[in-house]
Image (cartoon, rainbow, N blue to C red):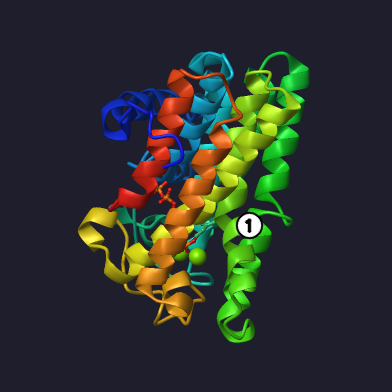
Amino acid sequence: MASGSTTAVFADFAPQLQSAIGTALENYCRFPEECPAKLAEAIRYALLAPGKRMRPILTLLAAEACGASHEAAMPAACAVEMVHTYSLVHDDLPAMDDDDLRRGQATCHKKFGEGLAILAGDALLTLAFETVAQNIRPAEVAAVCCVELAGAAGARGMVGGQADDLSAGQTAGGALGVLESIHRRKTGAMFRAAMRMGGVVGGASPAALESLDEFGACLGLSFQIVDDLLDVSGDSAEVGKRVQKDADRGKLTFPALLGVDESRRQAEQFIEQAVGALENVATRPSVGVDRLESIARYVLERNR
Ligand code: IPE
Ligand code: IPE
Ligand code: MG
Ligand code: MG
Ligand code: MG
């Protein structure tokens, strides 16, 4: 660790944040009667399932590190979780990764059918932007958050990374640069947006925003490397999804390319880089920055 000064422990502070995020998400998905009941059920099933809420936690802590309240950042935090959840629902579809277990329960399409799962994902994506536009104030800050989220989620970011992930196994020829680029987009982009939106709500200076961005990029990359490792050696009951599927699907992953030990070393290196970026965010001591550093450590230790 670059600093080693942190006293925050993720396992101690996460439950309270996860619970606050869960309550806020619940409030944002109470649908009026014109929403078909089955669609509302499918959206709530996917969104309110016990995810780790990593991205919204990052948004809250980035805002906190810049001196803003969790309350002010909560709509942006919920929006990033809505986009993330839509990406999981679609990622699990037969046309993509074809999975039947997610967050410890049947995948959305297994429970509600493919058509409704696709539509639940569509609705989550649009709900995210409605949530930001309607609830972040002032309106200029909401507009900047919408641009951040759209850029990260779209063709240049997460969706682009997912598109290349679909064909990478066949075409990449094992290139590490291609793999890193996929992981930076399919997972890193949303981590960056989570951090940047927190910074924007907190009125971060351009330099602080750059540091938050760098932290998110490195953390996201490391997070996806660890996700690849959990597919190799994780326990399905703990992870809440099937494991040992990437190799069968011919996925281009870090362990497939570099082996388990070197992949872990790479994940550790990106975490060190992430923690290093925090040095520029705020004058220490800062609870928000300490908590961000503890999340970075958690990413390496996590088993779900
Ligand atoms: C899973 O994300 C997909 C990846 C980008 C690796 P998470 O591991 O954050 O999944 P949840 O939200 O906790 O279910
Ligand atoms: C998914 O990566 C990244 C997304 C943008 C959803 P994976 O396909 O490895 O995620 P899991 O393992 O299914 O959660
Ligand atoms: Mg996938
Ligand atoms: Mg998948
Ligand atoms: Mg995976």
Residue occupying the point 32% across, 33% down: 10
On whether ligand 2 comes within 8 Å of the CB at mark 1, the answer is no
- Residue 253 placement, left or right of 34: left
Residue 127 appears in the figure: no
Residue 291, percent across and down?
A: 41, 28
Residue 144, image x, y percentages: 75, 29
Q: Pinpoint residue 199: horizontal percent, then vertical percent.
A: 63, 26
Vertical side of 297 occupied by 232: above or below: below
Label 1 is placed on what type of residue? Arg
Q: Which residue is depicted at the point 53% across and 30% down?
A: 59
> Is residue 236 visible in this depiction of the protein?
yes
Residue at 47%, 58% (x, y): give it: 224
Bin the neighbour count of mark 1 within 10 Å (Cα to Cα): few under 14, some 14-19, many 20 and up. many
How many numbered marks, from 0 up? 1
**Image height check: is 31 above or below 268?**
above
Give the position of the N terminus as an image quadrant: top left
Above or below, 150 against 21 in this view is below
Q: Residue 3, percent across and down?
A: 44, 34
Q: Secondary structure at mark 1?
A: helix
Give the side of residue 215 with respect to residue 247, left or right: right
Residue visible at 39% across and 24% down in the picture: 23
Label 1, on which residue? 185
Q: Nearer the viewer, residue 103 or 17?
A: 17
Q: Is residue 244 left or right of residue 150?
A: left
